[in-house]
Structures are given as structure tokens and as C-alpha cells.
Image (cartoon, rainbow, N blue to C red):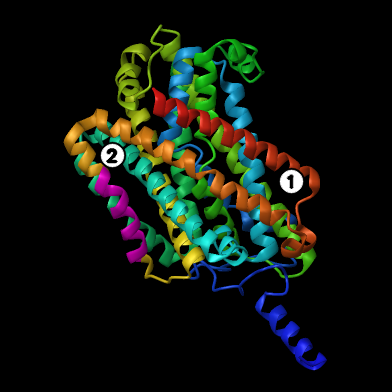
């Protein structure tokens, strides 16, 4: 090949994105209907820019307070009072770190995590990663569907099997909101989160916790090392916190912002996206801590230390707090939580399919297909086994997510640590080290949880 031909080939590869460490050229954006749809004014004030980036973090935060997390927080507060608040705080710090890496990768490469995996690895690796991600999306959706159905049952007396089917209607809600603009989806989710927060504020005021003990609960305790039951619940809280679909979701929806292409503009976008997700995840911590505090101040104080199922918690709140308002608020919060989680899980499913396979289905068809795959087993199990079967299916979905988690975290760390792919925005060594330690801990804890589940 002549020097001129080599130069032309090099320019071609650079133009296609193949000369910067990627195996394939950059494909069309996921969620193309809302990609770069929210303007970021270049000459605007710092506050105006920060407000422009506000939103994606709250969609991500939804996954950290889904119905699967409720069970572990309720069990931990009922059995050990406020002692496990430190574990909730630790798991939230881990989540903030991993979501920052997602935003960093998305801004630096212009790819979401699914696209980055497709363009980084050969097909015999990327296709299995896609299959595992799809399984995780289905498991996530399954948990949210069951949680929403339980909320409808507690609030309106709707049978679980009917409630499961009703959850399919949120597909049309997403399409309606997205047609009006991505900001409408963000506003809808934030509104639901505010309702959840208000419900817990009222319930905690009713429960009147010992605030001195609450503050002490955020400090590490050596009891974790001596009490196997406490350690097990601590592992459950950490293991159920980081959801694989959130890593794909965040890296996709960050790119709804129309930030600039220069290095300084990307650094600013990365910083503002991280601020957004950090504030939102601190909000998620407040909700998860509220669930644990409520359980400690009601069930643990009354000696009801074996409260694990959502229905049992709902039934016990009224007599313990002496108010019929408390269980209604509990059910409203659960319903809002399940509904918001189903919205974000469905969006994550679209990002995964489009990113890995570059398959473009109509949004309504993609979302309906994802939802139906989750609804089918939920309907079968609730018809056959009722509430107890639904609870076991909820637990099984968390085990499936635990198994898939390493296959989302490992590619993310590999990509953000690659200077060729990331350029100036490559994660620094200390951040990569912290991410590896976090991933190792999360994976180890999830392995133990799965082992305990299989041998119990």
C-alpha cells in the first residue's frame, strides 16, 4: 500500500471512529428521538447550565429505591433498629462512584455503555453481554411489575394478577410524555419521587424515632463482624443497591443534553452530570434511610423483628402507629416507587437493544415487548401461588440481577480506564482503583448472597 493510500485509510478510520481504539464505527444514537434534544446554553450562567443538566440523575435514582430495596431495608430496620444506616450510606457512596463513571464514559465517547461494549469487544463477547443485559432488564422489570401490583392491591384491593396486567399501560404513558419532550418524563419521575418523600416524612413524624440513635446509626459498628444475621442483611442492602440497568440507562440519557464537542465543554458536561446524579442519589439515600428508620421506629420498637414482606409491613403499620393514614401513605409510596421504576427500566431496555444490536424498533413495540416478557411470568406465578409466590419471584429477580452485575461493571471499568478510547477524560488512577475495589466488593457480596440463596 502506498503512503498516500495509507494516509487515506488512516483518515477514513479516524472519521469512522476506528482509529481511536474502537473496533467499529460509532452507530446512531440510542433514544434517537430525544438525543441532544435539551439545549445547554454556552454563554449561560453556571446555575442555568446546572439546571439544564438536572433530570437524568433522578431517573437513575429511581433504581436505587425500587421495591426490591424496600424488602431489605424493612427487614434490616425491623431486626436491628438503626444500626444498618451506615450500610445504606456506604452502598450509596459506591453507587455515586459507578454512576460518575457512566457519565464520564458517555460524555467522553459519545456512546452509551451498550454501544461502547458493542464497539469495543468482538461479537463472541458483545453478544453474550447483550443477552445477559436483556435478562437483567427482564428481571428488573419483573421486580417493578410485582411491586406496582402489590401497591395497587394494598391501595385499591386490586387482585395481584389484575394489577400485573394493568402495569402494561405505563408503556403508553411513556410514549405520551416522550412525544411532549424528554423533560416531561423527567418532571413526571421527579413528581413521583416528591410524593414518595412526602409520604415518608409524614410516616416518620408519626413514628417519632429516637433521633440520637438515628445519627449513631450512620457510624460503623463492630457488631457486623460478630452477628451473622446482621452481616447477612448488610450484604443484602449493598447487594440490592447497584442495578445493572442503571449503568446502561445513565450512559444513554446523559446524552439527551446538547453539550459541546470541545474538551473543556465535555469536562464541564461531565462535572454537571455528576453533580446531578450525586444530588439525586443522596435523595435516594434519604428515601432508603427513611424506610429503614420507619421500620426501626415502629416494628423494632414494638418487638416485631421479623418483618420482611411488603404486605406484612403494611398490615402492621396501622395498629403500631395508631393511624389509618399511615398504611395508606405506605401503599401510595410503594405504588409511586413501582410506577417510576417501571418507566426507567423500560427505557433502559430500549438502550440495551439499540446499543448492542443497532436494531431500531418503533418505541411502542420495543417497550410493549419488554413489558410483556416481564408480565407473563408474574401473571403465571401470582395465579398459581398468590402473594407468597409473588414475593418469592421478587427475591428471585434480585438474585438474577446479582448474577448479571459483574458483566456490566467490568466492561465499564475497562472502557473508562482506556486512554485511547477516553482521551483526556480517561479516569485517573485513583478513581479506577476505587472503582475496582468497589466492584470487587459488590461482586463478592452478591456471590455470597446467591450462594446463601441456593443453599438455604
Residue placed farthest to the front in the image?
A: 1
Secondary structure under tag 2 reads helix
What is the chief secondary structure element of the magenta stretch?
A: helix
Whether 234 is drawn above or below 213: the answer is below
Count how many numbered circles sit on residues in the image: 2
| Percent position of residue 12, x then y | 70, 84
Confirm whether the magenta stretch covers residue 338. no
| Percent position of residue 309, x then y | 34, 24
| Percent position of residue 163, x then y | 24, 42
Whether 151 is drawn above or below 8: the answer is above
Whether 91 is drawn above or below 264: the answer is above
Q: Residue at x 53, y 54 (%)?
A: 248
Q: Residue at x 59, y 16 (%)?
A: 214
In this figure, which residue is indicated by the disc labeled 1? Answer: 432
Secondary structure under tag 1 reads helix
Q: Nearer the viewer, residue 404 or 366?
A: 404
* Magenta segment: 364-377
Q: Quadrant of the N terminus?
A: bottom right
Q: Quadrant of the C terminus?
A: top left
The residues tagged by marks 2 and 1 sit, at their Cα atoms, a distance apart of 40 Å
Question: Which image quarter: residue 22?
Answer: bottom right
Question: Which image quarter: residue 425?
Answer: bottom right
Confirm whether the magenta stretch covers residue 373. yes
Q: Residue at x 42, y 14 (%)?
A: 298
Q: Which mark is residue 149?
A: 2
**Dot 2 crowding, Cα within 10 Å, few <14, some 14–19, many 20+:** many
Closer to the N terminus: mark 2 or mark 1? 2
Q: Residue at x 42, y 50 (%)?
A: 137
Amino acid at each position: 500500500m502506498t503512503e498516500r493510500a495509507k494516509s487515506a485509510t488512516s483518515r477514513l478510520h479516524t472519521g469512522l471512529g476506528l482509529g481511536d481504539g474502537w473496533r467499529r464505527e460509532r452507530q446512531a444514537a440510542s433514544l434517537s428521538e430525544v438525543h441532544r434534544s435539551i439545549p445547554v446554553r454556552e454563554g449561560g450562567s453556571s446555575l442555568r447550565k446546572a439546571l439544564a443538566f438536572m433530570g437524568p440523575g433522578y431517573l437513575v435514582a429511581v433504581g436505587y429505591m425500587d421495591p426490591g430495596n424496600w424488602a431489605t431495608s424493612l427487614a434490616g430496620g425491623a431486626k436491628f433498629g438503626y444500626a444498618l444506616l451506615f450500610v445504606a450510606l456506604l452502598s450509596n457512596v459506591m453507587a455515586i462512584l459507578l454512576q460518575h463513571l457512566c457519565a464520564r464514559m458517555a460524555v467522553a465517547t459519545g456512546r452509551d455503555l451498550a454501544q461502547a461494549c458493542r464497539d469495543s469487544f468482538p461479537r463472541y463477547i458483545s453478544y453474550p453481554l447483550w443477552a445477559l443485559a436483556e435478562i437483567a432488564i427482564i428481571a428488573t422489570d419483573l421486580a417493578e411489575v410485582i411491586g406496582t401490583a402489590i401497591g395497587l392491591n394494598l391501595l385499591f384491593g386490586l387482585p395481584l394478577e389484575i394489577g400485573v396486567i394493568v402495569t402494561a399501560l405505563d408503556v403508553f404513558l411513556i410514549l405520551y410524555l416522550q412525544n411532549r419532550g424528554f423533560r416531561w418524563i423527567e418532571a413526571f419521575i421527579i413528581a413521583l419521587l416528591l410524593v414518595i418523600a412526602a409520604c415518608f416524612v409524614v410516616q416518620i413524624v408519626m413514628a417519632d424515632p429516637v433521633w440520637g440513635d438515628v445519627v449513631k446509626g450512620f457510624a460503623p459498628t463492630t457488631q457486623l463482624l460478630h452477628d451473622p444475621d446482621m452481616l447477612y442483611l448488610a450484604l443484602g442492602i449493598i447487594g440490592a443497591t447497584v442495578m445493572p440497568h442503571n449503568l446502561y440507562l445513565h450512559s444513554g440519557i446523559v446524552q439527551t443534553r446538547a453539550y459541546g464537542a470541545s474538551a473543556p465543554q465535555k469536562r464541564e458536561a461531565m462535572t454537571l452530570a455528576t453533580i446531578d446524579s450525586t444530588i439525586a442519589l443522596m435523595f435516594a439515600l434519604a428515601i432508603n434511610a427513611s424506610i429503614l428508620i420507619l421500620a426501626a421506629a415502629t416494628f423494632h420498637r414494638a418487638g416485631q423483628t421479623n418483618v420482611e414482606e411488603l404486605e406484612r409491613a403494611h398490615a402492621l403499620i396501622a395498629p403500631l402507629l395508631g393511624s389509618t393514614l399511615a398504611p395508606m401513605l405506605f401503599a401510595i409510596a410503594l405504588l409511586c416507587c413501582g410506577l417510576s421504576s417501571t418507566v426507567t427500566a423500560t427505557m433502559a431496555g430500549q438502550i440495551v437493544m439499540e446499543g448492542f444490536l443497532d436494531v431500531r424498533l418503533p418505541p411502542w413495540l420495543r417497550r410493549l415487548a419488554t413489558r410483556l416478557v416481564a408480565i407473563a411470568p408474574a401473571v403465571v406465578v401470582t395465579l398459581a401461588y398468590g402473594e407468597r409466590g409473588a414475593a418469592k419471584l421478587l427475591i428471585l429477580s434480585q438474585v438474577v440481577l446479582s448474577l448479571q452485575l459483574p458483566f456490566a461493571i467490568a466492561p465499564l471499568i475497562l472502557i473508562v480506564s482506556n486512554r485511547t478510547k477516553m482521551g483526556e477524560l480517561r479516569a485517573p488512577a485513583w478513581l479506577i482503583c476505587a472503582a475496582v475495589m468497589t466492584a470487587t466488593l459488590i461482586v463478592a457480596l452478591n456471590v455470597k448472597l446467591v450462594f446463601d440463596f441456593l443453599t438455604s
